[in-house]
């Protein structure tokens, strides 16, 4: 019978991909890896729950960003937009286009967290089990670009067109599937992939900022209070970290978000490309136009990011618990 290895020997064990990793690497501060499939499942569930809670603020933000009339704007601000929507469309007016976001939020969050976990595991595998700040930025950027291409661009384009359609004198879209069929019939697949460049820039910068802030804050908090990596943090603490990460991303890339919204609206044909949109906004509306919708976006994003990180951690903990029970 083979002798058992000594405690200080480098004993191989398996990472989520079945590759051997050493106990030495784990002991050196390596974070226990999370299988990307768990990230996809937990992220999808968290994303679906989160969007149902925060959608009204997304609706108001989009309406303000689409209101490009600088001389006589339709809305005087977020409160005026809320009053107008309530008066003319009632409570459910704030949920116009929600189905689009629900259909898209599950795959969006699934791709985001799945890609992030995959990239983090790959980074740690090549850097002795450690994830540096550069690694956090790289993995967040990769997650953002992945979700922009695979889920966010078509979802956001359809959502913006639905919200934009509601402000028309005679709305044309009778529902999600009718609206999508109409867009594709009149504009082709390009009609649901407008603003891809702006969306990639937005989502890439969004997730690079958010995951950098979250990873840094979590590492600092765990070290300060001596909390092991396998143990989930208090949901309130996670929420505060998430809210701060969301705020950082809002102030960092709202101008990109405004351009993306314009490129995906029903009036997108006025712009030749992303750069032309930037030039025309700056020329005809001034620098402040790049920060339209900042207040409602700040409200929504802080709540959004806080909730999705809380939900992700809790769902992931539940998945691990069930997996442990099944294995016995």
Image: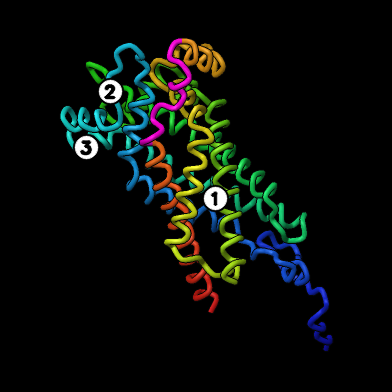
Helix, strand or loop under label 3: helix
Helix, strand or loop under label 2: loop
Of badges 2 and 3, nearer the viewer stands 2
Question: Residue 113 got which mark?
Answer: 1
First along the sequence among labels 3 and 1: 3
Dominant secondary-structure state across the stretch colored magenta: helix
Residue 55 in view here: yes
First along the sequence among labels 2 and 3: 2
**What distance separates the C-alpha of mark 2 from that of mark 3?**
19 Å
Report the residue marked by disc 3.
Answer: 92
Helix, strand or loop under label 1: helix
Q: Which residues are magenta?
A: 284-296
Q: Are marks 1 and 2 in contact (CB under 8 Å)?
A: no
Q: Quadrant of residue 184?
A: top left
Q: How many residues crowd around disc 3 within 10 Å: few (fewer than 14), some, or many (20 or more)? A: few
First along the sequence among labels 1 and 2: 2
Q: Is residue 316 magenta?
A: no
| Picture residue at 59% right of the left edge, 42% below the top | 208
The furthest residue to the bottom = 1
Residue 121: % across, % down = 67, 56
Q: Are marks 3 and 1 in contact (CB under 8 Å)?
A: no
Residue 253: % across, % down = 52, 33
Q: Which is more toward the observer, 80 or 97? A: 80
**What distance separates the C-alpha of mark 1 from that of mark 2?**
36 Å
| Picture residue at 44% right of the left edge, 46% below the top | 106
């Amino acid at each position: 019978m083979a002798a058992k290895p000594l405690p200080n020997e480098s004993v191989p064990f398996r990472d989520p991909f079945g590759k051997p990793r050493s106990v030495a690497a784990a002991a050196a501060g390596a974070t226990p890896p999370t299988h990307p499939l768990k990230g996809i499942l937990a992220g999808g569930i968290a994303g679906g729950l989160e969007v149902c809670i925060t959608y009204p603020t997304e609706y108001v933000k989009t309406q303000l960003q689409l209101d490009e009339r600088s001389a006589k704007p339709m809305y005087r601000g977020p409160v005026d937009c809320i009053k107008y929507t309530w008066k003319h469309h009632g409570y459910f007016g704030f949920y116009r286009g929600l189905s689009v976001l629900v259909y898209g939020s599950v795959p969006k969050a699934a791709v985001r967290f799945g890609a992030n976990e995959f990239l983090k595991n790959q980074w740690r595998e090549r850097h002795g089990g450690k994830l540096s700040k550069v690694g956090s930025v790289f993995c967040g950027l990769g997650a953002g670009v992945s979700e922009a291409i695979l889920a966010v661009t078509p979802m956001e384009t359809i959502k913006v067109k639905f919200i934009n359609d509601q402000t028309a004198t005679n709305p044309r879209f009778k529902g999600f599937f009718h609206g999508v069929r109409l867009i594709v019939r009149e504009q082709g697949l390009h009609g649901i992939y407008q603003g891809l460049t702006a969306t990639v820039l937005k989502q890439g910068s969004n997730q690079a900022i958010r995951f950098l802030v979250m990873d840094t804050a979590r590492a600092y908090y765990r070290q300060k209070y001596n909390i092991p990596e396998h143990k989930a943090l208090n949901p309130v603490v996670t929420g505060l970290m998430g809210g701060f990460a969301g705020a950082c991303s809002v102030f960092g890339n709202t101008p990109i978000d405004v351009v993306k919204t314009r490129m995906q609206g029903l009036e997108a044909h006025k712009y030749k490309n992303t750069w032309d949109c930037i030039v025309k906004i700056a020329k005809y509306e001034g620098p402040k136009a790049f920060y339209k919708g900042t207040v409602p976006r700040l409200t929504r994003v802080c709540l959004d990011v806080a909730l999705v990180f809380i939900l992700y951690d809790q769902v992931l903990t539940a998945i691990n618990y069930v997996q442990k029970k099944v294995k016995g």
